[in-house]
Amino acid sequence: MQTVGINIHKWRTRRHWLRNGLTILAETLIWAGCVYAATLAQGAKPAQSLHPSSPMTVLMGWGFAILLFVTYFIHNNAFSRTARRDEVVACAMKTALAFCVLNLVVFTERTSLQILCYVFFAVALTVERLIVNNWFIRYCTQPAHSEHGVIICRGGDTAQQALQRNTYGLMLSRLEMGDALPGQDPLAQRLAAYLTAHKETTSVYCSPSVLSPAEMEAVAHTCREQGVVLHLLPLPTTTFNPSVRNECRGTICVLSPAKRPLRSMANRAVKRLTDIVLSLLILLTVFPPFALVAFIYIKRQSHGPLLTFRHMCGMNGKPFRSLTFRTRHFNAAPSFLDGTDDPGYFPFGKFLSRTRLELLPQFLSVLAGSMSIVGSQAMTPESHANYRRELQRLFASGYRLKAGITSYQFPGQTEGSPEADVWYCRNWGFWLDMRIMLRRLGTLLSRSKAKSINYI
């Protein structure tokens, strides 16, 4: 058994050195290509610059030596099963930064060729690491290259699904603890029997909270004897509420409240600035001519005011006056018919309602600060009480968000449900707002017969 383990270790060591050697060779070729591209960009002729004492050749040689030194101290995590894309990018940028700093230390003279080479190399190295990581993940998820492990857990434990979902290519089997029955084999003996029968298993996972100290010591001793790695799960493997999430503080795992990007003053400033710029753009270009056209048509087809207002509120519960173009006759009785089939609509009002151009005056409220272009669903103050109770059920009673001209919605969402608003608060981003606005614009251009003013 020991001989087999040594042979496997030797093969893994050889494979490790072969992989690292090929990686350094590929990145050396990338560096040479960056130097060549920078030379071409400066208008020089590379064929005449290959002399051993030329700056191009010296830069390539020193770059190769420094690249060997940097890659020895900074691990390439593109070949890690658990590395996220942002971690791969961060590691690539750290390697490129260390490489550039050491090159600048070696060369006392600073030239534009060097700076251009470093910029090209940082970009190319990042792209190369992402491509390698994508290939390695596909390689790991193939059944022939999967990592086999066993998890020691109780019947209701959900750690197996969580580990398999977050670790690429990890194939986990369950070893149920059960209750201590008379005549039952101890846990360590059953684990040893399992590892003997399944020699492809390379790792054991368990939580110290479900094992006694004696069982934990016996399991660790069995793992050492069988030559497998023991991984400890530092947190109870239960399903947590969506209002908390698992984070790492250094080497310690903790439970933290869910992120709320809009609590940051900088993010709120970005969102408010976006609202001001876009609302001014609409109000100074589209709104004046369309308001003139709407005034003429509305006055010709129906007597009454041009605008109507309703008292509405958003997630924050603060009421405001929501302005819209009038789409129905002023004294029309309420109708139970759907959409524009209501006889209370005049012809131009049907057009405004179908294209949602009736909402253009709400950009005045956005500019005034009582609304946002993308925010929570708008509701009446009377319906906010039920909405607030739903927020408390989702552990989001402290969330505050202005009502929006449009809002994020889940497919098939029921009216008045705050799940999508809570998700938006926890996942807000500038580009998310841009995607929601583009989807809203696409709906308008396709003349979608949406029934809600918040439909996107």
Image: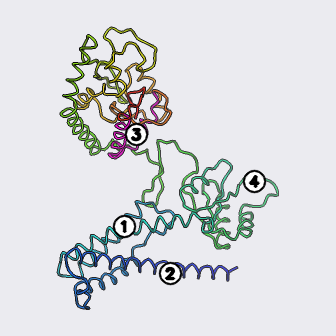
Mark 3 residue element: helix
Looking at the rendering, the stretch of residues picked out in magenta corresponds to 416-443
Q: Are marks 2 and 1 in contact (CB under 8 Å)?
A: no
Closer to the N terminus: mark 4 or mark 2?
2
Query: Residue 112 location in percent, x, y?
Result: 18, 75
- Which of the 4 image quarters holds residue 66? bottom left
Check the image and report above or below for 35 versus 456: below
- SS class of the residue under badge 4? loop
Q: Report crowding for label 4: few under 14, some 14 to 19, many 20 or more residues within 10 A (C-alpha).
A: few
Residue under label 2 = 18
* Residue 430 in magenta stretch: yes
Q: Earlier in the sequence, mark 3 or mark 2?
A: 2
The amino acid beneath tag 2 is Leu
Rate crowding at label 2 as few (under 14), some (14 to 19) or many (20 or more) other CA atoms within 10 Å. few
What residue is shown at x 35% (from left), y 23% (from top)?
353
Across and down, in percent, residue 271 comes to 28, 41
Q: Nearer the viewer, mark 4 or mark 3?
A: 3
Mark 3 to mark 2 CA distance (whole Å): 46 Å
Q: Amino acid at mark 3?
A: Tyr
Residue 30: percent from left, percent from top: 35, 76
Q: Secondary structure at mark 1?
A: helix
Q: Which residue has dot 1 on it? A: 126
Question: Which residue is under mark 3?
Answer: 424
State the mark number for residue 180.
4
Question: Please, is residue 342 above or below residue 393 in the view?
Answer: above
